[in-house]
Image (spheres, rainbow, N blue to C red):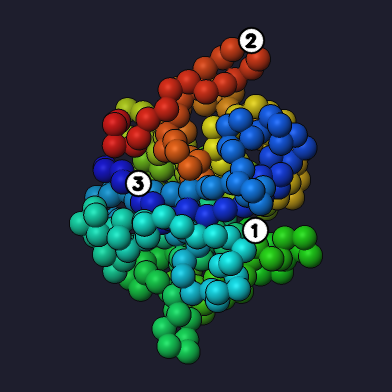
Amino acid sequence: MKLHTIDTGLFKLDGGAMFGVVPKIIWNKTNPADENNLCTWAMRCLLIEDGDRLILIDTGIGNKQDQKFFSHYYLHGDASMDSSLADKGFHRDDITDVFLTHLHFDHVGGAVVRDGDKLAPAFKNATYWSNKDHWEWAVTPNEREKASFLKENILPIQESGQLMFITGDDGVQFTQDISIKFAYGHTEAMMLPLINYNGKQILYMADLLPSVGHLPMPYVMAYDMFPLKTLTEKKIVLTEALEKEYILYLEHDPINECCTLQQTEKGIRLGDTFKLSEL
């Protein structure tokens, strides 16, 4: 097995929304905002070479939306899905599996492309993986969350016939070396892959832990549907990660790809930070 970081660019979101009830005077120290109160975030995907499978976890925001949409998110940076895949010697047509942690636009937007007047899967040879509970939640969204679930990012996947659902409970095996944890605070049935890699356990954190700045337990996003559930899940997952020495892979941290944890007088806090390529 080989793992590759796939950077798909940077975007901006409101700092207050990203840190919920935490005052700006505190979170601004770790994630400084610009003059519009916006902070920069990564859209960092993960590519897994596993035997004859090439598995991509999440797809970034994509490029098919209109100018008005992108004007809200200030996309910047030189990286893209195609350029990052090319840097690793791959093309999108090589991908065999697209694993979608959840269907918010910054995670699934790159899964579908605009081909003339049509929308089609960006990875034409891949099976797309979600789970039934989250899929139904996304295609019949609540009023608060529906701006994050865009039909043009989701429905073409099912219409193509390339969609499959993962079934089972927490800990279900996706492959021999990849199991799945489920989280329900950010959105219904978000999936976190736990990867057994060279004797180490790497947990892809998706939106349960967007950045190292979110490590303190109360630092929960206002975007989360059920913040108290997120709080409980963070305690459970981070405690397990500390005890079992997991490496956390961070999808949205603008600087840090991976980190470990340590116990301090203030609780579980940041240990070491490093790039995936350093493992």
Q: Is residue 56 visible?
A: no
Q: Nearer the viewer, residue 101 or 40?
A: 40
Q: Are marks 2 and 1 in contact (CB under 8 Å)?
A: no
Quadrant of the image containing the N terminus: top left
- The residue indicated by pointer 1 is 133
Q: Nearer the viewer, residue 166 or 129?
A: 129
Q: Nearer the viewer, mark 3 or mark 1?
A: 3
The residue tagged with tag 3: helix, strand or loop? strand
**Which of the two discs, 3 and 1, labels the residue nearer the N terminus?**
3
Residue type for callout 2: Glu
Residue type for callout 3: Thr
Q: Spatial distance from mark 2 to mark 3, Cα to Cα? A: 33 Å
- The residue indicated by pointer 3 is 5
**Which of the two discs, 2 and 3, labels the residue nearer the N terminus?**
3
- Write the residue at 37% across / 69% down: 123
- Write the residue at 51% across / 66% down: 109
- In the picture, measured across the screen, residue 77 lies left or right of residue 35, that is left
Residue most toward the top?
265
Q: Nearer the viewer, residue 23 or 103?
A: 23
Quadrant of the image containing the C terminus: top left
Where residue 64 sits: x, y (%)?
Answer: 49, 74
Give the label on residue 265, or none.
2
- Write the residue at 29% across / 37% down: 277
